[in-house]
Image: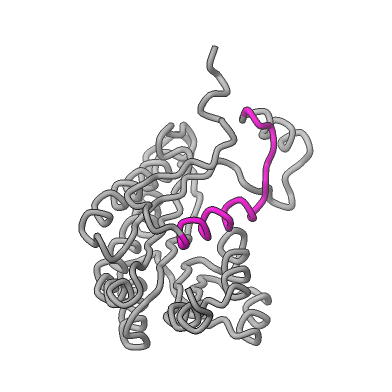
Amino acid sequence: MTDSLQSNKNADPVIITGGAQRVGLATAIELQKKGYKVVITYRKYRPILDELESNGITIVHADFGNEQGIQRLTEELCSRFNSLRAIIHNASEWLPESHNQADESVMQRMINTHVMAPYLINQACGDMLIRHGEKYGYADIIHMSDYVAASGSKKHIAYAASKAALDNLTLSYASKLAPWVKVNSIAPALLMFNEDDDEQYREKAKKKSLLGNVPGASEGVNTIQYILESQYLTGKIIALDGGRHLSRAG
């Protein structure tokens, strides 16, 4: 592919929801370095946003806690852009149930963020992705899922259930939007620690996988780039778990 064609191909934006921290932030920075036009959404203001904006990344406020906030974002995207290179659904919240009791507000928040937002955005922006795919060969939707979507979670039941629903959206949209749009999930286990995680927790967490490490945001970024560059991958749930699914095998 010539440099000019690659440049034109990257002219349509990559949308990254929840792009102001952790894997989303690392992805936004790396893709911009690679020549992509990057647009990120954020829920809470962080000082890093000013730096990102000064470096040419477009920032858009969006709160997925309710359907109105999601609809406002879809309307803004449709008014700003005619076609899209990719949508990376990275926005996430990790809320536990309280005191072992059913908590409707937790479930609703998880569904809104991990299911309703990707669903409504994909529905509204599907044609924009197809337009890019028709011109350049393919566009992408990437759903950032989680290891617990397949295993379940005793402490984060609503979270795990919503991520499982997100994986199912991957299967539906891969069929619906083919052949112009590739749709895949990335389902990581623990990729990176929080700053306040103590050493005891860190050591215990490392032992959960066969490889015994916590690789950092770069592992997620590398997988996203692999999907964007692939011409033969769709409808897949890619596990980034260091062999965790085998760690209890005999």
Toward the top, the furthest residue is 250
Q: Main secondary structure of the magenta part?
A: helix
Count of numbered badges drawn on the protein = 0
Rendered view: 158 above or below 229: above
Q: Quadrant of the C terminus?
A: top right
- Residue 215 or residue 85, whichever sits in front: 85
- Residue 134 or residue 13, whichever sits in front: 134
| Residue 241: quadrant of the picture | top right
Rendered view: 237 above or below 70: above
Q: Position of residue 110 (x, y in %)?
A: 39, 52
Q: How is the image coloured?
A: one colour
Residue 217 among those drawn in magenta = yes
Q: Position of residue 35 (x, y in %)?
A: 56, 77
The residue drawn where x is 72% and y is 45% is: 197
The residue drawn where x is 56% and y is 31% is: 243
Query: In the displayed structure, does residue 198 sit left or right of residue 239?
Result: right
Query: In the displayed structure, does residue 115 sit left or right of residue 142?
Result: left
- Residue 129 or residue 113, whichever sits in front: 129
| Residue 14: quadrant of the picture | bottom left
Rendered view: 213 above or below 82: above
The residue drawn where x is 53% and y is 80% is: 3
The residues colored magenta run: 210-229
Q: Position of residue 236 (x, y in %)?
A: 37, 46
Toward the right, the furthest residue is 199
The residue drawn where x is 39% and y is 58% is: 231
Residue 240 among those drawn in magenta = no
Rendered view: 55 above or below 66: below
Toward the left, the furthest residue is 176
Q: Position of residue 198 (x, y in %)?
A: 76, 41
